[in-house]
Structure formats: structure tokens, C-alpha cells
Image (tube, grey):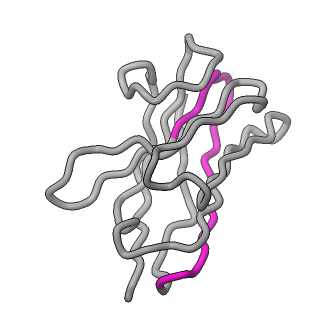
Amino acid sequence: VQLQASGGGLVQVGGSLRLSCTASGVYAVAWFRQAPGKEREFVASISRSGATTIYGDSVKGRFATSRENAKNVVDLQMNNLKPDDTAVYYCAASRNYLSAHEEADRYDYWGQGTQVTVSS
């Protein structure tokens, strides 16, 4: 299984970006991010059906993840972006878990990452 994340870029504070991750034959999908010098951070996860989503505290109310299984696409809509959102964003997918989870070790496949930079 190969994951392909896209949609990163440079945006000003308060702006929006939409990341997409293409993956087939997987169950739960999650987004993580890692900023320079910081540990990897959970951002969001969505269940196999798309009915359940969970978010990290720092992005609740600003980010939303969704999926369209017929197209094998999972999106992360990021609104009201802040400088602290600057990081490399990774999508990850599980081959075993149907439900959304924030634990990184539940995900078996990882994309290559896409850079998001929020300028002030």
C-alpha cells in the first residue's frame, strides 16, 4: 500500500489549506505532523466508514477530516491556520483497525509527508 499526500504549501495566518491523501485497501486513516525540533503530533483520524473522527486538542474546531472511499481519498481541511501549524504533515493508514485512533503505532503505512508553512 502506498500513500500519497498532497496539498501542502505556504499560507498566511488565518488562511486555509486542504491536504489530500490517496490510499486504497486500508481502514482507519490518520494525520500526524512534525515540526522541526519537536515530537510527532497527532492531528486527526477518521474511521473506515467515515462516520467517526477524532482530533488533537490543538486543531479542534479548525481542522476537519473526511473521506471518499469510492475515490480512495482522505482529506484534511485546515482553516484559521496559525504559525504553530507549520510542520510536515503525514497521512497514515491502518490495515487492521476500523476505528479512528490517535496512537501512531496502530498505523501500518505512512506517506512521504507534505510541508505546510504558515507565515505571520
- Seen in the picture, residue 30 relative to 11 is either above or below; the reply is above
Q: Nearer the viewer, residue 90 or 3?
A: 90
Q: Is residue 16 visible?
A: yes
Image coordinates of residue 88 in percent, x first then y, are: 36, 58
Q: Which quadrant of the figure has residue 86?
A: bottom left
Segment tinted magenta in the rendering: 13-30
Image coordinates of residue 19 in percent, x first then y, are: 59, 59
Which residue occupies the extreme left position in the image?
Answer: 37
- Seen in the picture, residue 86 relative to 96 is either above or below; the reply is below
Left or right, residue 51 beside residue 63:
right
Magenta-colored stretch includes residue 70: no
Left or right, residue 57 beside residue 36:
right
Name which residue lies at 78% across and 25% down.
49
Magenta-colored stretch includes residue 20: yes
Image coordinates of residue 33 in percent, x first then y, are: 38, 51
Q: Nearer the viewer, residue 35 or 27?
A: 35
Name which residue lies at 58% across and 32% down.
29
Q: Is residue 19 visible?
A: no
Left or right, residue 47 beside residue 50:
left
